[in-house]
Amino acid sequence: MKAYGVDSKVLTDRAVTACFTGHRPEKFPKKLQTPQGVTKLYDELAREVDDAVMSGYHVFITGMARGVDTCGGLYVAKLKREHPELGLKLVCAVPFADEEKRRRGKDLEDFRTLVESADEVLYISQNYIHWGYQLRNEFMVDHSSLLMGIICRDEGGTANTVKYANKQQMRSSVMDIRNEFSMFGLMPHDFMDRD
């Protein structure tokens, strides 16, 4: 394992820990960038979290990126609030100590909600470094046994995270939406705006 210089009191058992990855909604295929499309994808992600909980996962790491990471983390925070008997733990793996300063509006509000809901907030680096996001992604994979998320492109941080997890032979529940209409048995008209 890499030396991250990060000590965690929550990330003690990789076997019951899952993490999130995913492209931002504006990177999704056009037909899935609609509110209905994004909602369907995030609902499916929530079902994946529910399945993970039923399979014994109770620690979840969010990398705090906009989109899938945030959505997954907010869903875990909601489950923690509504079902404390599940004993769920939420860990925020923040790439840089000043990451919050990069957020505005709803993104800032969600960031703060996740930090307030977390059992632990870990800063992978105190200062911005060029490879900091990749280091955060590898940290999450190195401390988990399940990767959950949504991928729609073969490049970028999400694709690199999936490739890294595959090299580690990690269990994966990442939805591939490059062919958005075959997913969930949906048809093109499911994503058209109706008056």
Image: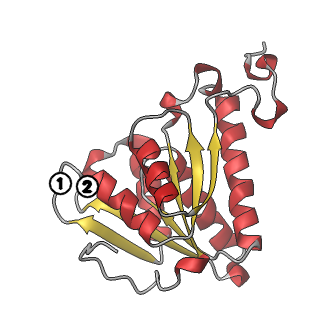
Mark 2 lies on residue: 132
Question: Can residue 26 be seen from the camera position used here?
Answer: yes
Q: Which residue: 55% across, 30% down?
A: 28
Left or right position of 26 against 173: left
Amino acid, disc 2 = Gly
Mark 1 lies on residue: 128
Q: Which mark is residue 39?
A: none
- Mark 2 Cα within 10 Å, few/some/many (few <14, many 20+)? some
Q: Can you tell which quarter of the image residue 175 is in?
A: top right
Residue 69 percent location from the top left of the image: 50, 52
Q: Nearer the viewer, residue 26 or 13?
A: 13
Residue 92 percent location from the top left of the image: 42, 66
Left or right position of 92 against 32: left
* Quadrant in the picture for the C terminus: top right
User: Element type at marker 2?
Assistant: helix
Question: In this rendering, is residue 42 above or below 50?
Answer: above
Q: Which residue: 38% across, 61% down?
A: 138
Q: Label 1, label 2: how many angstroms apart (C-alpha)?
A: 7 Å
Q: Nearer the viewer, residue 104 or 10?
A: 10
Question: In this rendering, is residue 84 above or below 78?
Answer: below
Left or right position of 125 against 14: left
Q: Nearer the viewer, residue 166 or 85?
A: 166
Whether residues under marks 1 and 2 lie with C-beta atoms below 8 angstroms apart, the answer is yes
User: Element type at marker 1?
Assistant: loop
